[in-house]
């Protein structure tokens, strides 16, 4: 991911990993999106903020859901701290892009909270 970084034309003000619900984080022990974001931060020097986007609602794992169910599953699942992102360009990091439902929901939350723009960067893209 960091090797492709030089191709970005507009650098973000901060990097935000897609959060897990606290129960899933405790069960798994790590957030894969956060691990990726931290590695990108170490290479490109743009700050990761792990606290401005929160998963407020427990959602089912997306892996076994169809596209319509995925969208419904993550609808309004996130909240954001507007004071920290107002007018900022956000780079949202996740591990896998399948239908985009999670990223669309998270990005919409960040935009509603006042972010100037939200871009997404994922390690992998699932092919159907």
Image (spheres, helix red, strand yellow):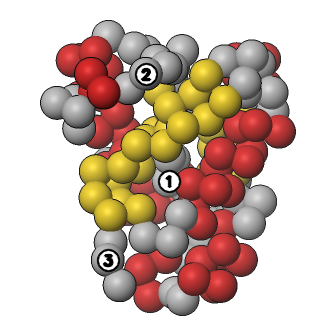
Quick one: label 2 or label 3, which is nearer the N terminus? 2
Furthest residue in direction left, as rendered: 3
How far apart are labels 2 and 3 at the CA level? Answer: 27 Å
Residue visible at 73% across and 27% down? 115
For the question of whether residue 26 can be seen, the reply is: no
Tell whether 105 sits left or right of 42: right
Identify the mark at residue 20; answer none if there is no mark. Answer: 1
User: Which corner quadrant of the image does residue 116 belong to?
Assistant: top right
Quadrant for the C terminus in the image: bottom left
Tell whether 58 sits left or right of 8: right
Furthest residue in direction top, as rendered: 45
Residue visible at 49% across and 76% down? 62
For the question of whether residue 121 can be seen, the reply is: yes
**Residue 60 image point, x, y percent:** 55, 77
Quick one: label 1 or label 3, which is nearer the N terminus? 1
Identify the mark at residue 30; answer none if there is no mark. Answer: none
Crowding near pointer 2: few (<14 within 10 Å), some, many (20+)?
few
- Total numbered labels placed on residues in the image: 3
Q: Is residue 4 above or below residue 63?
A: above
Residue at mark 2: 9
Quick one: label 2 or label 1, which is nearer the N terminus? 2
Residue at mark 3: 127
């Amino acid at each position: 991911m960091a090797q492709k970084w030089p191709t970005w034309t507009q650098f973000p003000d901060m990097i935000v990993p897609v959060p897990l619900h606290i129960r899933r984080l405790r069960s798994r022990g790590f957030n894969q999106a956060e691990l990726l974001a931290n590695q990108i931060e170490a290479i490109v020097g743009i700050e990761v903020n792990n606290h401005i986007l929160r998963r407020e609602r427990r959602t089912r794992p997306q892996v076994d859901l169809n596209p319509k169910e995925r969208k419904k599953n993550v609808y309004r699942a996130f909240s954001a701290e507007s004071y920290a992102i107002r007018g900022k360009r956000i780079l949202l990091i996740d591990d896998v892009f399948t239908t985009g439902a999670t990223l669309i929901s998270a990005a919409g939350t960040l935009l509603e909270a006042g972010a100037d723009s939200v871009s997404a960067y994922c390690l992998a893209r699932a092919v159907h």
